[in-house]
Image (tube, grey):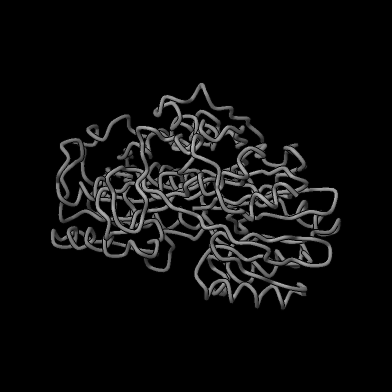
Amino acid sequence: MNFTLYGHDGRWILVDAGSAFAPRDIDGVEAIFPDPASLRPVLPFLDAMIVTHAHEDHIGAIHRLWPGIRCPIYATPFAAAVIGNRLAEAGTRGRVTIRTFRPGDTIRAGKFNVRTVRVTHSVPECVALALGTPVGTVLHTGDWKFDQHPVVGRPTDMKTLKALGDAGVLAMVCDSTNADRSGTSTSERDVGNGMRRVFRQSPGMVVVSCFSTNIARLASVARAAAETNRMVALAGRSLINNEKAAREVGLLDGVPEFLADTRHLKGLDRRSMVLLCTGAQGEANASLAKLATGDSWRLPKIHRTDTVVHSARVIPGNEESVYEIFDKFREQGVRVLECEHQGYPLHVTGHAVAEEIEEMYRMVRPRFSIPVHGEQRHLDAHCAIAARAGVRYAIPPSEGDVFAVSASRVEKVAHVDIRLVAELSGTRGRWVPWDSSDPYSFLDKAPVAQPNPAAALAAA
């Protein structure tokens, strides 16, 4: 649920506004995200939100909270298209200002001069943000890795990262997801080689499950299928919408077209069929689950000669749901492949491993480090990497912590209790229900009675 505020001289910008999967022990909840009432003292001073990339945990709250949060949204063309489609479905597209930028552009927002830096990840057009102020620069990396062959888009802009380091960076807020893993992250180009091998060897239909925003994976599958005389159909609304958005902004130029409908697979020889599915995290209503149970007339029936390729990482907490679906396939004699096949990768991580994180530090050379993302072991590993790279001080935050960064130090100065809300009303338990019938009611709530540390910082 990335939702990070940066403030300077009384003005603020927001970086990303994401949502999270609902816990399995709560029924009827689609998504969980921060209640903006928790941040109410800052909202009147908010000049912009800047989106680093189009993953759900970075944009999933936008169509639920805007235009209630009345600031413009800055996003790259692909992210802007995805956000715009969701706002259109919510009926609020014309009431929200979306300003498009290209990776490498500079954005002036309030007190900040924000230089965007191209980075690679598992979704196209990702950026890190160099947040410039008169007192110094903070680099917000977003999600990233170093991939010299990303299939869609260009590699990370190492030249600009080095230039930022030469100019001086006060602090780096950096992804820790794979900080405890050594080695080198595999390139997306290698996935295409793995897919071609599976497509050639499989006697029946091949089903590939992946994240709907992984446009490079769609390109890898499309090219591998074309080279092995297979036809590809997309199953799942988000996959179809994101593929359309990617083509509209030119990210899939030269990539073979997909079939217009999954029903066009019916009647083909099974050796010539590929079905790309949503549901890589075990979502009950997604295409992969429906295929396993035979619950959709639009999808071809599964056969024991078929192969399922899970081309995604299982997010911790979703294991039970995912493996229940895999078991349903295996009960029908279907082969299920994960991670790799005969030494060829079928999925690659979108996050930097330890050696890449250390390389990032040696380029940027920040004075201070604020590791984010992951669990405590990832944060601890990240702090150790920062220390080896010569960082003066590393301090990982907890949810809601407020830090002050200056030339001399970074220190925790406050903590805000971030209330979480669930999208569907009527939910009870650990989460406060979200009133979807009045989603902007937080704007009319009475002012917070007790002193609020965020308000004090905003006033300062």
Q: Quadrant of residue 357?
A: bottom right
* Residue 12 visible in the snapshot: yes
Is residue 321 rendered to the left or right of residue 34?
Answer: left
| Image spot of residue 94 (x, y percent) | 51, 21
Task: Pick the residue in front: 104 or 73.
Answer: 73
Left or right of 169 on screen, residue 93: left
Q: Quadrant of residue 51?
A: top right
Query: In the rendered image, is residue 152 in sight?
Result: no
Residue 74: give x, y in percent of width and height.
62, 36
Residue 190 falls left or right of residue 22: right
Residue drawn at 72 percent across, 60 percent down? 404
**254 in relation to 163, above or below:** above
Relative to 446, is 396 above or below?
Answer: below
Q: Nearer the viewer, residue 382 or 2?
A: 2
Quarter of image, res 42: top right
Q: Residue at x 51, y 28 (%)?
A: 248
Furthest toward the top, the residue is: 94
The spot of residue 336 in percent (x, y) is: 26, 61
Q: Residue furthest front?
A: 449
Q: Residue at x 70, y 64 (%)?
A: 360
User: So how many labels did they put on this image?
Assistant: 0
Residue 392: x %, y % from top left: 77, 73
- The residue lying toward the viewer, choosing from 44 and 364, is 44
Q: Residue at x 79, y 57 (%)?
A: 162
The one of 166 and 138 positioned closer to us in this rendering: 138
Left or right of residue 409: residue 38 = left
